[in-house]
Image: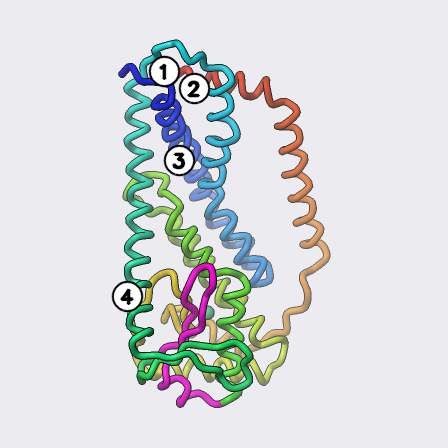
Amino acid sequence: MIAPYAVRLFCLCLASFFVVNLSAGLIVSAASRGAMRVAGTMRARVAARFLFGIRILPFALGIGAVLGLCVPSYLWFEPQATPERVGVGCLALVVLGAMSWFVAMGRVSRALVVASRCRRIWKETGHEDHLPRESSRAVVVEKDAPLLALAGILRPRLIVSRGVLCALSADQLDVAVHHENAHRVSRDNLKRLFLLMVPDSIPFVRGNGALEEAWAKFAEWAADDEAVQGDSNRAVSLASALLRVARMGAGPRLSFLHTSLVGEDRDLAARVERLLEFETVNGRPASQTRSLRLGAGFAMAALVATLLAGPAILSSVHGLLELFLH
Ligand SMILES: [Zn+2]
């Protein structure tokens, strides 16, 4: 297909993203078990960040390859006048790439629709109020349903039902609200949006689900740790709050973009057990801090080397892109 300059660039971007996302996605899938084992040796907050980084790495590399290599090398080395054809292989990659983006956008749209339906219901049946011991306001929904959740992506708000307010003691409510605030601080709802947005390596094949579940588990544990603040009494209060809310029955259907106090039933037993065992987790070991700094140093060195070797790299990349064109 003979295509104009901009259309060829668009096709090359989609195809390049698909190839990089697929390659990196397969490597991440192969390495995910090992990554989850390593995460198990870390503090919950560090483990959650580590697993989230690994999960979105193929997407980040794909976007980086397109914006940092594909686009500049094409604009630099591709003459505007040549009427080149987009090869059949490239077209196939474009179709696959577009499909994986459409599937991801579909996931995001469905989650947004459910979130918007919840927001409408909460607006009709709730009102803003101050909770005891809390400076920030929450939306109190006048229902008995077990509902204590954080809703919203950029400015998340606490949603709590009258049933939960009546069921929990002041201490239990305090630590449960701190748990949700910890999700707010670590922007977990925004991370959930990213997880939905990341296109699958192979369209319609949702790989790396185990990695996402592990991230969700450690994100819950991290919020538990921050709510408990190293106090065994608060740990017991949070465990009893979790059980009390869970015993209230099934909660309303929430969006994937919401974090709920008792979200995943299968993780509840492990969370309660962990809180009751309550091992005081001391600060991150120095070696781990050093390894994080070392990783950041390597990344910076790689970036500087890439910038210095820019023209040579872009020329090579352009040679590769020419494989897609005739
Ligand atoms: Zn939570």
Q: Is residue 310 above or below residue 107?
A: above
Q: Is residue 163 left or right of residue 47?
A: left
Gap in angstroms between the C-alphas marked 2 and 1: 7 Å
Mark 1 vs mark 4, CA separation in Å: 46 Å
Q: Mark 3 or mark 1, which is nearer the start of the sequence?
A: 3
Identity, as a three-letter code, of the amino acid under mark 3: Leu
Magenta part of the chain: 146-169
| Mark 3 vs 2, N-terminal side | 3
Name the mark nearer the viewer: 1 or 4.
Answer: 4
Tell me where residue 173 appears, x and y as whole percent: 48, 83
Disc 4 and disc 3 in contact, CB within 8 angstroms: no
Would you name the residue on which mark 3 appears? 22
Q: Which mark is residue 325?
A: 1
Q: In the rendered image, which quarter is residue 11 located in? A: top left
Q: Label 2 neighbourhood size at 10 Å, few (<14), some (14-19), many (20+)? A: many
Q: CA distance from mark 3 to mark 2?
A: 17 Å
Asked whether the beta carbons under mark 2 and mark 1 sit within 8 Å of each other, the answer is: yes
**Circle 2 is placed at which residue position?**
321
Where disc 4 sits, the SS reads: helix
Coordinates of residue 298 in the picture (x, y in percent): 66, 38
Which mark is drawn over residue 117?
Answer: 4
Q: Position of residue 13 (x, y in %)?
A: 40, 28
The CA span between labels 4 and 2 is: 45 Å
User: Which of 6 and 73 lies nearest the eye of the viewer?
Assistant: 6
- Residue 46 lies, in percent from the top left, at 58, 58
Mark 1–mark 3 contact, CB under 8 Å?
no
